[in-house]
Image: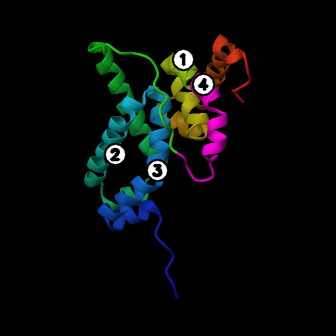
Amino acid sequence: MDEMPLQTPELLAVDLDRGFAELVRSHGGVVYSVLLRLSGSSRDVEDLVQDTFLRAYTALSGYPPERRAALQPRAWLLAIGTNVWRNHVRTLTRRPVAESGVDVGELPLADGRPGPEQRAEHVVERERLVAALAELPERYRVPVVLRHIAELGYAEIGDLLGCPVGTVKAQVSRGLAALRAMPRLAQEEVIR
């Protein structure tokens, strides 16, 4: 009889290196996508993703197998990624970069997402939305991105950010309201 394939946390508990490769394969796109929307810059996102996974591997190597088996990898990686992004923002404020602005670049395709033709139709809307997200204050941008880009639940976001679910709901609602009120998004409805 065939054995059921191990889930990522169980694989991490049994074989850290193979489990980590599976973790990167299965969650790399989500981490990239969330960090791209948070940073608004395709120039920085690859470094942020690499730093996220480097910190994740370092942390996992110190965890006992029981803790690795009980891990919720997506939420855990997004928490690390969000902290990496915050540290990056702090570094940039201490050492400003001469070039600023939003570079929307290429967005990765995930399973079930629109193909190149559908993406090409929505390039303008996506660019406006990414630029508008970059203008949101961090306290609204992070919850909006985690809810609508990473598709995390309110409870997961609350755990990740260390605040009550009601606060997360309010921040997401206020962030969406701020996006809807932005003139660059008023021309067409790009926010659901």
Q: Residue at x 62, y 39 (%)?
A: 119
Q: Amino acid at mark 4?
A: Leu
Element type at marker 4? Answer: helix
Q: Residue under circle 4?
A: 129
Mark 4 → mark 2, Cα distance in angstroms: 27 Å
Mark 4 → mark 3, Cα distance in angstroms: 23 Å
Q: Position of residue 66 (x, y in %)?
A: 37, 60
Which region is colored magenta?
A: 109-129
Density class for disc 2 (Cα within 10 Å; few <14, some 14-19, many ≥20) is: some
Query: Is the C-beta separation of discs 1 and 3 under 8 Å?
Result: no
Which one is earlier in the sequence, the residue at label 4 or at label 3?
A: 3
| Side of 124 where 93 appears, left or right | left
Q: Which mark is residue 53?
A: 2
Q: Residue at x 50, y 30 (%)?
A: 37
Element type at marker 3? Answer: helix
Density class for disc 1 (Cα within 10 Å; few <14, some 14-19, many ≥20) is: some
Which one is earlier in the sequence, the residue at label 1 or at label 3?
A: 3
| Side of 95 where 148 appears, left or right | right
Q: Which mark is residue 27?
A: 3
Q: Residue under circle 1?
A: 136
Q: Is residue 178 visible?
A: yes
Q: In terms of depth relative to the viewer, which is nearer, 162 or 189?
A: 189
Mark 1 → mark 2, Cα distance in angstroms: 26 Å
Q: Position of residue 31 (x, y in %)?
A: 45, 42
Q: Is residue 105 magenta?
A: no
Which one is earlier in the sequence, the residue at label 1 or at label 4?
A: 4
Q: In terms of depth relative to the viewer, which is nearer, 181 or 172?
A: 181
Q: Amino acid at mark 3?
A: His
